[in-house]
Amino acid sequence: MVAVLPSSATEQTRPAWGDLGALAALTVLLRLPAYLASAHLTFDDGVFGASAVAMREGGQPYRDVFSSQGPLFLPLLWVADLLGARTTNAPRLLSLAAALVLVLSTYVAGRAITDRGGALLAGGLVSVTATTLWITGPLAADGAALAFATATMALVLRWRDEVTVPRAVWIGLGIGATVSVKALLAPVIIPAALVLLAGRRAGPIVAGAATAIGFHLVLWLPWGVGDVWDQSYGYHLEVASDRTPGANLAKVLSTMGDRDAALLVAAALAVLAVVLGRRSASPTPGEGRATSPDVLLLSWVGASLLVLLVEHPMWRPHVSQLVPGLALLAGRHRPSWRVLAIAGVVVLPYHLVHAWPVLRPDPYEGSAAEAVAVLRDLPDGALAISDEPGLVWRSGHATPADLVDASVLRIETGDITASSLASVAARPEVCAVVVRSAERWGRFDDLPHRLDELGYEVAARDGDSRRVYVKPDCHPA
């Protein structure tokens, strides 16, 4: 397979602070509008914003604050919120940090397997593609997990020919951190295992595996093993139903077609360059070995795609885990810069149209703005609950820790019912209930009656499924 290689071993290790600085500046600039957005941008953005506020109020992960993510995610969110001085947008610092780690790790990985231009291309693609913008602008566990996975992959590629015990420990830490944020990104284990097993030395193999497993399991202990299992693993297993590989593949292709046109074009051009150059070029040194860069990258992308195909339900943000590997392959096998420049000019308008909602987010409008206005008028210290928790977060109020995640999956598992909602609404500190979705709390036909019995009144209405209920005589301590 034809590849653009580093010109020397020195090039693989030489610091490139200018490149890193330029990529960092581009990455931050593209995500500042999402960081500063006055509205929550995705359902997860609202859930995790509400989760951060619940932890400010003293809620602990799993014990108080419901979390369907791994045991490292909410602690990282807590740290980001603290570093941001616990302002309204402070939790989004985690996404901004994840974006920087993700893009810069892609560049570092690229320097280990191709030249400077290929590494810049890979890092640039990961920075600008809309799939990664949606998980590293708004809050999303996918962003932090993908950042750890890509950093791990950078270590694997740099050390692929000589993994010592200390290096294996670092790789194990990367794997442990990845799955401790989101287990769905476990496929990075495959290329790491190929490198560790290729050395045929028990020391690095044992060190890497023990570190990854140990790091992950130790994080369970502070929050209670049972609670972590129930929310991070058992919850997902309970809602999983029949696999739909065909439908999932269609969603992967449509998502990347909409959000990652630049990446797909670059990857297609790389494939074309390989095909056209195969006859005239000599084989790449080490081609075909289990530890060759192409094998390692393809194993990562292939294993990730397999997980996406068998996952249920599969959400669009999950497609992001294909992006760094494809970008690195595109950088390693890129065609001429002239061809890439022409392709970039052609695809740019299409990319901007599909990325614009995250590049220039809109404020709340219509009934959403009305709902937030009602919530902002609640007394100081009042709590509110909603099937769109971001509205409560952006209003400056807190959500009870057990209801920061109001997803459909929690309803389908019976974790959230009309009765449980009424029980929370009856608490003296809860002053408002906001229903925004017919698929979520709007499906509970008896909820309006239950709220009426508790003294709630409709303060705003938009159709049958969007209502804001307020308790007029609410006086939180």
Image (spheres, rainbow, N blue to C red):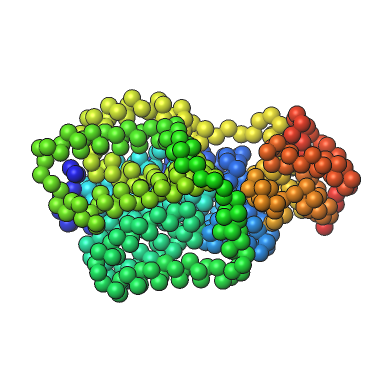
Residue 369, x across and y down, in percent: 69, 34
Residue 198, x across and y down, in percent: 25, 64
Residue shown at 82% from the left, 57% from the top: 477
Question: Depth check: 443 or 365 in front?
Answer: 443
Q: In which quarter of the image is residue 202?
A: bottom left
The single residue placed furthest to the front in the displayed view is: 242
Q: Quick check: 56 left or right of 31?
A: right
Residue 95 visible from this viewpoint: no
Residue shown at 23% from the left, 41% from the top: 333
Residue 124, x across and y down, in percent: 34, 41
Residue 180 visible from this viewpoint: yes
Q: Quick check: 371 left or right of 43?
A: right
The quadrant of the rendering that contains the N terminus is: top left
Residue shown at 74% from the left, 38% from the top: 442
Question: Depth check: 236 or 168 in front?
Answer: 236
Question: Depth check: 244 or 148 in front?
Answer: 244
Residue 305, x across and y down, in percent: 40, 46
**Above or below, comparing residue 346 to residue 185 in the picture:** above
Q: Quick check: 328 left or right of 219?
A: left
Residue shown at 41% from the left, 47% from the top: 306
